[in-house]
Amino acid sequence: MIQGKWFAPGEDLSAEVLPLRTEVFGDPGSAVDPEGWNTLVYLDGQPAASGRIWWEDGAFWLGRVGVVPPLRGRRLGDLALRLLLFKAQSHAAREVRLRCGEDTEGFFARLGFRPVRRESGTVEMMIPGNEISLDSCAGCRKQGCPNRKEP
């Protein structure tokens, strides 16, 4: 079973979120944790993916979106990202930004993020709030899918 959980700003992240981040990123967190909302995706009761969102300088920012290595490829990171975008959308975000490695740019581009700046292997990406789409069929190339409503 897949479940999601939110951690409000200031909540204790030490039991579940920080160990997952250490496994995925090699370190547990940063100074924005007390200011941000964190989400955790569980697979069969075990923490599997995480991400965070916070407000800074007129935009919502995403960070620490990741999946534990043995569980990658199961769309759990996609779910964590969509949860974060839902949070931004529910707060009438004008734009959502993130910084990621060039190797993960395609992951974020699938949901509409566009590069706005590149610098030494890092990409800053942005999506306008009015372009956020949580439709899992948007951009899907699967033919004959009963969920797709062809024009």
Image (cartoon, rainbow, N blue to C red):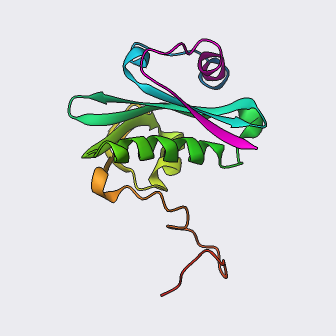
Position in image of residue 80 (x %, y %): 56, 41
Residue projecting furthest to the bottom = 151
In the rendered image, the residue lying farthest to the left is: 58
Q: Is residue 123 magenta?
A: no
* The magenta stretch spans residue 17: yes
Q: How many marks?
A: 0
- Point out residue 97 in the picture as x, y percentages from the top left corner: 34, 39
- For the record, the magenta segment spans 1-21
Identify the residue at horizontal 65%, vertical 80% (top origin). Answer: 143
Identify the residue at horizontal 65%, vertical 14% (top origin).
15
Up the image or down, 99 lies above or below 95; here it is above
Asked whether residue 122 is in view, the answer is no
Q: Is residue 39 visible?
A: yes
User: Whole-percent x and y of residue 24?
Assistant: 64, 26
| Relative image position of residue 35 (x, y in whole percent) | 36, 19
Residue at the spot x=26%, y=36% of the render? Answer: 59
Q: Nearer the viewer, residue 48 or 109?
A: 48
* Residue 47 vertical placement versus 16 (above, below): below
> In which image quadrant can residue 63 be found?
top left
In-image side of 102 versus 67 (left or right): left
Image quarter where the N terminus lies is: top right
